[in-house]
Image: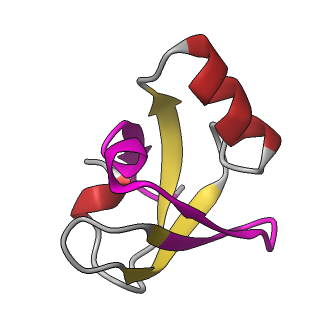
Amino acid sequence: MTISKLQVGQTRVVKGLRLPPGEAAWLRAVGLYEGVSVTPLRFGPFRGPVHLRTSTGAELAIDFDLAQAVDLGDLP
């Protein structure tokens, strides 16, 4: 499962990032990393940006293609 497959309001835990090292490092730096829970707040139309909230309280928007590269697992 990836962020792009979640419904608004569904929460899951980040298990891994299937991205080139630079992109993965950027996501980790802005608060999206393994072990943190994520909840999509809204999806932009036509595969637009995904607005997320993390369990650390961070809110960010990421490109839909990045959202497809974030692997998720169930909550503990």
Task: Point out the image quarter for the C terminus.
Answer: bottom right
Rendering coords of residue 24 (x, y %) = 60, 27
Vertical order, 24 against 53 (above or below): above
Part of the protein shown in magenta: 51-75
> What color scheme is it?
secondary structure
Q: How many marks?
A: 0
| Quarter-of-image position of residue 48 | bottom left
Verify whether residue 74 appears in magenta: yes
Taking the view exactly as shown, the residue that stands out farthest to the top is 21
Rendering coords of residue 25 (x, y %) = 71, 26
Rendering coords of residue 54 (x, y %) = 67, 66
Q: Does residue 60 appear left or right of residue 43 in this picture?
A: right
Q: Does residue 46 appear left or right of residue 23 in this picture?
A: left
20 or 76: nearer the viewer = 20
The residue at the point 71 percent across, 68 percent down is 55
The residue at the point 64 percent across, 19 percent down is 22
Vertical order, 65 against 53 (above or below): above
Verify whether residue 8 appears in magenta: no
Q: Does residue 10 appear left or right of residue 60 in this picture?
A: left
Q: Does residue 15 appear left or right of residue 4 in this picture?
A: right
Rendering coords of residue 46 (x, y %) = 18, 72
The residue at the point 29 percent across, 68 percent down is 6
| Quarter-of-image position of residue 37 | bottom right
75 or 31: nearer the viewer = 31
The residue at the point 43 percent across, 54 percent down is 63
